[in-house]
């Protein structure tokens, strides 16, 4: 026997355990996967009234995989909720963005999932993100360091960066919100959403 055969003999238990635990994880993932997706879908529907004021979550209509149309209790269109994701500092950021009926303003923002640095980048899921509400969508939003409260209140397409987490602030703005809003506005203007 070669010296490598000794290692193969000793490694059989490790290989067996890896196969058993791998199969167990795959089984758990396949059995719980649909439940996880349903819970995420319900969480998104529950947030629609928070990001599109006056919307009735029971009347929310799914237009596509990433677009929800929000109605009030009487059936009047109030706006849109779009899901978007992009790479943050640490991992993917997933957000739900509220827009008014003509998609000219952001009506709210909810962070569905993020794994940014706790205490720093994770602040994108805090009241910090309320500064997106009321921002116009006709041009991309820009992240600026050190905006005063008065400058933030202007809603002039500028977002104040989180102190110590500029990368997370820019990632949310540049890789999640701006592309999703621009793509949605294009679809809305070309009538692509009406075809669905």
Image: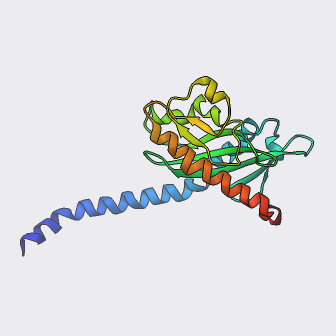
Q: Quadrant of residue 9?
A: bottom left
Specify whether 181 is left or right of 120. Answer: right
**Quadrant location of the N terminus?**
bottom left
Asked whether the viewer can see residue 72, the reply is yes
Return the residue nearer the eye: 175 or 11. 175
Q: In the rendered view, tell whether residue 77 sits above or below residue 128.
A: below
Q: Position of residue 20 (x, y in %)?
A: 36, 60
Image point 37% across, 57% down: which residue? 21
Residue at the far right: name it.
74
Image point 6% across, 70% down: which residue? 3
Q: Position of residue 55 (x, y in %)?
A: 81, 40
Image point 69% across, 36% down: which residue? 133
Specify whether 90 is left or right of 193. Answer: left
Image point 53% across, 59% down: which residue? 30
Q: In the rendered view, tell whether residue 61 sits above or below residue 123.
A: below
Q: Quadrant of residue 42?
A: top right
Return the residue nearer the eye: 28 or 145. 145
Q: Position of residue 18 (x, y in %)?
A: 32, 60
Q: In the rendered view, tell whether residue 73 sits above or below residue 26.
A: above
Specify whether 185 is left or right of 163. Answer: right
């Amino acid at each position: 026997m070669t010296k490598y055969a000794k290692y193969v003999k000793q490694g059989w238990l490790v290989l067996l355990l890896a196969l058993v635990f791998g199969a167990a994880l795959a089984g758990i993932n396949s059995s719980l996967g649909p439940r996880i997706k349903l819970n995420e879908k319900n969480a998104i529907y529950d947030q629609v009234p928070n990001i599109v004021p006056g919307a009735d979550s029971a009347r929310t209509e799914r237009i596509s995989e990433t677009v929800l149309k929000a109605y009030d209790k009487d059936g009047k269109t109030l706006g849109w909720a779009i899901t978007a994701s992009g790479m943050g500092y640490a991992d993917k950021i997933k957000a739900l963005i509220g827009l008014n009926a003509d998609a000219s303003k952001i009506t709210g923002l909810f962070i569905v999932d993020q794994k940014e640095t706790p205490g720093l980048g994770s602040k994108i899921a805090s009241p910090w993100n309320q500064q997106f509400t009321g921002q116009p969508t006709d041009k991309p939003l820009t992240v600026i360091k050190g905006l005063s409260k008065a400058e933030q209140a202007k809603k002039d397409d500028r977002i104040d960066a989180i102190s110590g987490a500029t990368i997370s602030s820019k990632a949310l703005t540049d890789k999640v919100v701006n592309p999703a809003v621009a793509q949605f506005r294009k679809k809305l203007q070309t009538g692509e959403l009406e075809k669905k």
